[in-house]
Image: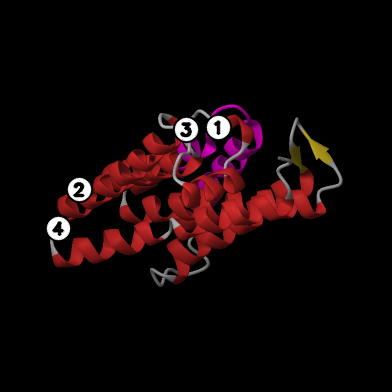
Amino acid sequence: MTFTFKNELARKFVHFLSLFIILVYFLASDFFSEKIALIILVLILIILLEFEYLRIELGNKIPILSKIWSYMRRKKEKDKLGGDIFFVIGAILVLAVFDLRIAIAAILMTTLGDLSAALIGKKFGKHPLLKTKSWEGTIAEFIVNIIIGISVFIIYTGTSFANWQAWTIILVMALTATFVETVVNKLDDNLLIPVFAGFNGQIAFLILSYI
C-alpha cells in the first residue's frame, strides 16, 4: 500500500495524541511523586510493547487492530517496533534526566516539530533537501520548534523576551531537533530528537548558569 498524505496525517495524529504523556506525568507528579509518574509512563510503554508483540510476533491476527496497523505503519515498520514506542522511550528518558522545562520542550519539538516537517513537506515540499526531506518541511519544523521554545522558556515562565540566556537555549534545542530530523533517515527520530535536543539544551543550560 502506498504511504499517502492521508496515511501520514493519521500516523502523525496518533503521534500527536502521545502528548497525553505530558499530562499523565504532571497529574501523577502532583498526586503522587515524580518517581511514580515515571513508573506509570513505563507501564504505558509496557502496554504498547504488548500490542507490538501481537502485531509483530503473532502476525496481525486481531481484525480491528490489523486494519489500524496496516493503515498507519510504514512498510519499514512491518516487522519492527513502531515510532510511538521510541517516542515513549525518549519521553521517559528526558523526563527522568533533564530539567523539566527542557524535557517538555524536547518532547513537544519531537511531536509538533516532526509533525510540521512531515505534513508541510509532503503537501507543499517542492525543493528537495537530502534524500526524503524538503526545504519547506525543514523550515516549517524550525519555525514550530522556535515557537515551542518561546512558549516553554519565555511565555510559560514569564521570562522577558530580552533574556538572551533563554533565547540561547531555545535556538540550541530548535536547531538540534531540526538537524536531527533532517539528517536521520534509517534510525528512528522519535527517540533521537528528544535525547539530542534535550541533552544539548541541558548542556547549554548548565553552561549559562555559570556565566
Query: Which is nearer the N-term, disc 1 or disc 3?
Result: 3
Mark 4 or 1 closer to N-term? 4
Q: Work out how far the residue at label 2 is from the one at label 1, CA to CA, in angstroms.
A: 29 Å
- Is residue 199 at least partly visible in the picture? no
Measured Cα–Cα span from mark 2 to mark 3? 29 Å
Q: Is residue 47 visible?
A: yes
- Given this view, does label 3 or label 4 mark the residue nearer the observer? 3
- Spatial separation of the CA atoms under disc 4 and disc 1: 37 Å
208 or 7, nearer to the observer: 7
Residue at label 3? 59
Percent position of residue 40, x then y: 22, 52
Magenta segment, prevailing SS (helix, strand or loop) = helix
Find residue 191 and report its image quarter. top left
Is label 2 or label 1 in front? 1
Residue that appears at 38% across and 42% down:
51
Please name whichever residue, 2 or 155, is drawn nearer the observer in this view of the structure.
2
Closer to the N terminus: mark 3 or mark 4? Answer: 4
**CA distance separating discs 2 and 4:** 10 Å
Q: Which residues are magenta?
A: 171-194
Real-space CA distance between mark 1 and mark 3, rounded to the nearest whole angstrom: 10 Å
Count residues near mark 1 (Cα–Cα under 10 Å), then give few for <14, some for 14-19, many for 20+. some
Q: Which residue is mark 2?
A: 39
**Circle nearer the N terminus (2, 3):** 2
Disc 2 residue crowd, few under 14, some 14–19, many 20+, Cα 10 Å: some
> The residue tagged with tag 1: helix, strand or loop?
loop
Residue 182, magenta (yes or no): yes
Q: Secondary structure at mark 3?
A: loop
Element at badge 2?
helix
Q: In the image shown, does 204 or 68 lie closer to the viewer?
A: 68
